């Protein structure tokens, strides 16, 4: 076979970034779309062919031959030479690279597609040449492919040249212009084909692949290239892309060889290395086990770039599911099959608070101290920024009660790859006076039964530290409560989010809960003066605890305000036998809350222990528990609740558990079922939507004193012939309001009594 010694090979390359991995934030990890880049590649190849054709002397060809090169819609087409209606093209083998011989002129046609790194591409562009990854291995580090802050780069090259072109380029300028006009008429022959007799897959040296499975992978990837088929340049180029797209090869070059049996098309490929190890840098929050599991199946196998892309996508998906600003920014195959991943995690660089005016939205000076807001945030400087964590921080700041609107804006911190977090806040008015009204459940008879009025002053941001002061007065037909509360929701210097509440209260409540029905004690009132301090702290998600000391001075008064120590049955009204009882209570409470709405779960258990610091102070222990569970069944909601308690020790009768009423057993008056040392109340309710904010409900309640009524001092329930147990059922409506759901219910008791019940808010 004649060698084309006068032909030399050059390469023109274009680097094509593959589509980037989806990024949850706007950082400089972007590349152009693959489709656009492939279009540019085909145009560049076609322009290269046009330039070569323009430099060739076609007049030297045999008159019986005609060569057509064309470019249509940016695609390079293969060439064919015909004589007497049959193909007469010849592709010669020159140093393992296919050559095209036409008449006395020898042209070299070569196309290649390979994966390269951007750092290599930069170096190659500066030198004006392209070196494939298979020929750029030096030392112990092999860069089969590299993904810096953009994904894989794909390089394709095609060159046709003759040696005399380099010296005659300037002289052929006018001839090239003439030839370009001439060959434009041949664009009608865009799809001229060359008959291929044999298709093979070989390594870069033209030898058989050691692994037959890889050879089969390459052959199976081919679509157009088949033995005894006529191909165009574009079809060969597409098959080159398919071999690369299989993921097992880092480069692929088609080579055509003219043999005795016809033209043989060889795809010279370079397989990837076998995966032998993994090095991951920059993944500070990614679990090592998740990383190992993502690559475990590929250990000891040839690296497949498609499966590698899937593993990278799963890592990026892990970050996205948790709202973390992070992704795999670079991948590199080192010598020995070691895979190196570079993960970029956007750490929080700085957190700032910006106050906005309520009316104009412009930045202004806020009343709240910035450190008071910053310590509420779980996002800290140096952490990987999380959108989910930021959302929780917004909700936490809103629950402070001093902000009208809160939003977080993450911004890139220059070119550092970090994030500056700006929190915009709009403050609410700090406080003021208010007045209102309500209903007391302790009074169920009379013209204005249960109506109360209220007047209050509140300041929700004392000293700009979110400390709250409330002074309120509630006054009804008999009820009256004067209360002063001072709350610090987070004690300064404490890292456990401990709150402190100081409370002073003077109240008068009706004694009808225990000492009504069957007697003439309807005018009795219970007077209490209470002072105490409580500390609360969340110790687990949705769990909180409270501990405190409360001093209480309590007694019973008549309708004229005089102290009363015995009821109309001659039973004592105080435990000490004096006009009042003093007690110091140590309080402990544990609370679990679900989402906070009516259908969520809730569990509360509290205990109070009387401390007899002085001999006359009472000593007793009281335990109380409440549980609630809501279940959604289609549009309806089922709510089940259970409560119970027990008292041990010496306690006054008015501290007994009262059963019956709006928040206990509906269908009975307040406390009409009984009052005991122990109790249990169960309730079931089904609510369903009716119209807009209106809901309908059906319910059933049951309560009992567990036969503990006679153990209460003076047996007030037995003296008033209370049953000690009972049930009620009925129906009602709920209407949403700013104060909570307004409840209007009509209930029937097991004693055939019928009653309306009205309440505000959820049942206790």
Image: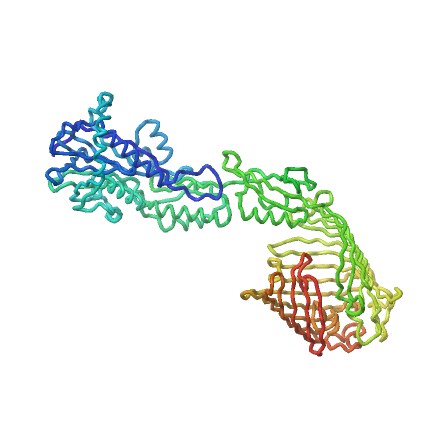
Against 694, residue 461 (above or below) is above
Indicate whether 9 appears above or below 525.
above
Count the marks.
0
Quadrant of residue 541 in the image?
bottom right
The quarter in which the C terminus is drawn is bottom right
Depth check: 666 or 123 in front? 666
For this view, does 669 lie left or right of residue 615? left
Q: How is the image coloured?
A: rainbow
- Please determine whether, in this image, residue 555 is positioned above or below residue 463: below
Viewer-proximal residue, 429 or 276? 429
Whether residue 613 is visible to the viewer of this picture, yes or no, is no
Q: How far from the left and from the top, in percent, is residue 694?
A: 63, 63
**Can the viewer see residue 348 in this picture?**
yes
Foreground: 66 or 181?
Answer: 181
x%, y% of residue 111?
25, 36
Relative depth, front residue between 129 and 598: 598
Quarter of the rendering occupied by the N terminus: top left
In the rendered image, residue 360, in percent from the top left (x then y), is placed at 65, 40
Residue 109, position as x, y percentages in the image: 21, 34
In this picture, residue 428 sits left or right of residue 653: left
Residue depicted at x 32% and y 38%: 39
């Amino acid at each position: 076979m004649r060698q084309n010694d006068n032909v030399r090979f050059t390469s023109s390359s274009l680097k094509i970034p593959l589509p980037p991995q989806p990024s949850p934030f706007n950082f400089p990890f972007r590349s152009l779309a693959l489709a656009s880049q492939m279009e540019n590649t085909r145009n560049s190849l076609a322009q290269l062919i046009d330039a070569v054709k323009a430099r060739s002397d076609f007049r030297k060809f045999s008159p019986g031959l005609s060569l057509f090169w064309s470019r249509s819609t940016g695609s390079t087409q293969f060439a064919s030479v015909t004589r007497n209606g049959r193909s007469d093209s010849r592709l010669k083998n020159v140093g393992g690279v296919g050559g095209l011989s036409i008449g006395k002129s020898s042209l070299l046609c070569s196309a290649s597609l390979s994966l390269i790194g951007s750092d290599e591409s930069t170096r190659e562009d500066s030198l004006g040449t392209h070196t494939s990854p298979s020929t750029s291995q030096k030392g112990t580090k092999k860069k089969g492919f590299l993904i810096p802050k953009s994904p894989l780069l794909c390089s394709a090259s095609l060159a046709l040249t003759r040696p005399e072109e380099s010296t005659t380029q300037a002289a052929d300028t006018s001839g090239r212009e003439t030839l370009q006009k001439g060959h434009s008429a041949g664009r009608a022959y865009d799809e001229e084909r060359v008959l291929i007799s044999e298709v093979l897959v070989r390594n870069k040296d033209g030898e058989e692949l050691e692994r037959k499975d890889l050879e089969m992978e390459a052959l199976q990837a081919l679509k157009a290239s088949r033995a005894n088929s006529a191909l165009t340049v574009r079809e060969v180029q597409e098959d080159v892309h398919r071999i690369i797209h299989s993921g097992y090869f880092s480069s692929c070059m088609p080579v055509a060889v003219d043999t005795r049996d016809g033209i043989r098309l060889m795809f010279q490929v370079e397989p990837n290395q076998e995966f032998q190890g993994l090095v991951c840098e920059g993944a500070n929050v990614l679990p090592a086990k998740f990383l190992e599991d993502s690559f475990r199946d590929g250990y000891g196998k040839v690296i497949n770039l498609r499966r590698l892309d899937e593993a990278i996508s799963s890592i990026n998906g892990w970050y996205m599911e948790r709202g973390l600003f992070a992704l795999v920014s670079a991948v590199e195959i080192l010598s020995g099959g070691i895979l190196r991943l570079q993960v970029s995690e956007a750490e929080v660089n700085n957190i700032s608070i910006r106050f906005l005016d309520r009316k104009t939205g412009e930045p202004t000076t806020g009343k709240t101290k910035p450190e008071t807001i910053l310590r509420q945030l779980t996002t800290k400087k140096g952490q990987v920024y999380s959108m989910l964590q930021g959302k929780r921080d917004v909700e936490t700041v809103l629950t402070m009660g001093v902000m009208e609107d809160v939003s977080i804006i993450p911004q890139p911190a220059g070119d550092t790859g970090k994030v500056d977090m700006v929190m915009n806040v709009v403050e609410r008015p700090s406080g003021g006076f208010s007045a209102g009204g309500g209903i007391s459940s302790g009074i169920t008879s009379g013209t204005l039964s249960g109506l109360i009025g209220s007047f209050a002053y509140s300041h929700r941001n004392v000293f700009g530290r979110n400390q709250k002061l409330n002074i309120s007065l509630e006054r009804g037909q008999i009820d009256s409560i004067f209360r002063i509360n001072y709350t610090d929701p987070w004690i300064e210097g404490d890292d456990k989010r401990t709150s402190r509440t100081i409370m002073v209260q003077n109240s008068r409540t009706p004694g009808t809960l225990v000492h009504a029905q069957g007697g003439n004690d309807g005018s009795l009132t219970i007077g209490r003066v209470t002072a105490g301090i409580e500390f609360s702290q969340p110790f687990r998600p949705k769990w909180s605890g409270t501990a405190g000391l409360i001093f209480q001075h309590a007694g019973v008064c008549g309708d004229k305000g005089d102290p009363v120590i015995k009821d109309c049955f001659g039973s004592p009204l105080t435990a000490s036998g004096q006009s009042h009882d003093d007690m110091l209570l140590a309080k402990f409470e544990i609370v679990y809350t679900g989402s906070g709405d009516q259908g969520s779960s809730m569990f509360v258990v509290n205990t109070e222990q009387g401390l007899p610091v002085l001999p006359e102070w009472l000593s007793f222990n009281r335990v109380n528990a409440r549980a609630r569970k809501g279940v959604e069944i289609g549009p309806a909601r089922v709510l089940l609740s259970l409560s119970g308690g027990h008292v041990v020790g010496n306690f006054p009768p008015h501290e007994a558990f009262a059963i019956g009423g709006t928040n206990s057993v509906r269908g009975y008056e307040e406390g009409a079922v009984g009052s005991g040392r122990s109790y249990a109340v169960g309730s079931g309710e089904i609510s369903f939507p009716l119209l807009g904010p209106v809901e309908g409900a059906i319910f059933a309640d049951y309560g009992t004193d567990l036969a503990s009524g006679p153990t209460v001092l003076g047996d007030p329930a037995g003296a008033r012939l209370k049953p000690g147990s009972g049930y009620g059922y009925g129906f009602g409506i709920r209407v949403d309001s700013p104060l909570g759901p307004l409840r209007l219910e009509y209930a029937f008791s097991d004693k055939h009594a019928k009653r309306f019940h009205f309440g505000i808010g959820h049942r206790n």
